[in-house]
Image (cartoon, rainbow, N blue to C red):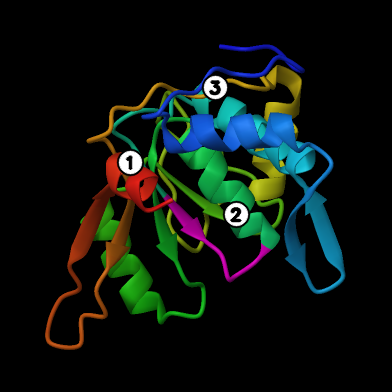
Amino acid sequence: MSKAGERPRTGTHAGVIAAFIACAHEFPDHIALIQDDRRLTYAELDRRSASLASALAARGIGRGDRVQIVFGRSIEFIIALIGVTRAGAAYVPIDPKWPEERRVLLERLTNPALVIVEGDAKPREAEPGLDEPRTRSSTSTGIGLDHLLNEGDDAIELGHAHESNPSDPIYIMFTSGTTGEPKGVVVPHRAVARLV
């Protein structure tokens, strides 16, 4: 784990997130993302994704977990996928324009530990008769990215990333399902590292 301003060590087989963090430290003021008239530097992307990863870790999200990200194409989508990966979990991208039936089906197939949606939606409170709040949420009642970022700001660890094995899943992509039930393709870290 490295502290703010300290450049993490990366080698030939550095993981996806380690490579991102190294790039963010080397080019902090360079523009990482552009959407319409919005710009986000590598330093800002590093901080926001680390904040999300800290919030997820505080909720017990980590290696072996799956997190659905219900976003359209946006800067927030990239922050979410980097943050989830940084926490050690695998992300499952869900297009909010998909029919509700498909989103519900994919939630059943992936059994996510958490669902992240756009905005500042708060997690549901504990249901009457239950000792603990619900840890899972549906695609229609997920936890808002803004809410999670606010939670993570208090415990942010820049440079921190969960150590992932090359065979650990980084994301799950689903087929269109035009000939039947959609099937998930699990993509490991090594596949993305090799490509990038």
- Mark 3 lies on a secondary structure that is helix
Nearer to us in this view, 175 or 19: 19
Q: Specify few, some or many for label 1: CA neighbours under 10 Å numbering under 14, 14-19, or 20 or more.
A: many
Residue at image location 29% in from the left, 41% down from the top: 190
179 left or right of 28 in image? left
Q: Position of residue 93 (x, y in %)?
A: 43, 61
Quarter of the image with the N terminus in it:
top right
Residue at image location 25% in from the left, 58% down from the top: 108
180 left or right of 73 in image? left
Q: Is residue 86 visible?
A: yes
Q: Quadrant of residue 163?
A: top left
Please, what is the three-letter code of the amino acid marked with disc 2? Ile
Residue 189, numbered label = 1
User: Total number of numbered labels?
Assistant: 3
- Nearer the camera: disc 3 or disc 2: 2
In the depicted structure, whether residue 18 falls above or below residue 3: below
Q: Position of residue 100 (x, y in %)?
A: 40, 76
Residue 78, numbered label = 2
Marks 3 and 2, how far apart at CA: 21 Å
Q: Position of residue 45 (x, y in %)?
A: 71, 43
- Mark 2 lies on a secondary structure that is helix
In the depicted structure, whether residue 33 falls above or below residue 114: below
Q: Which residue is mark 3?
A: 58
Marks 1 and 3, how far apart at CA: 23 Å
Q: Quadrant of residue 20?
A: top right
Nearer to us in this view, 177 or 16: 16
Q: What is the magenta range? A: 68-74
Marks 1 and 2, how far apart at CA: 17 Å
Q: Specify few, some or many for label 3: CA neighbours under 10 Å numbering under 14, 14-19, or 20 or more.
A: some
Magenta-drawn stretch contains 73: yes
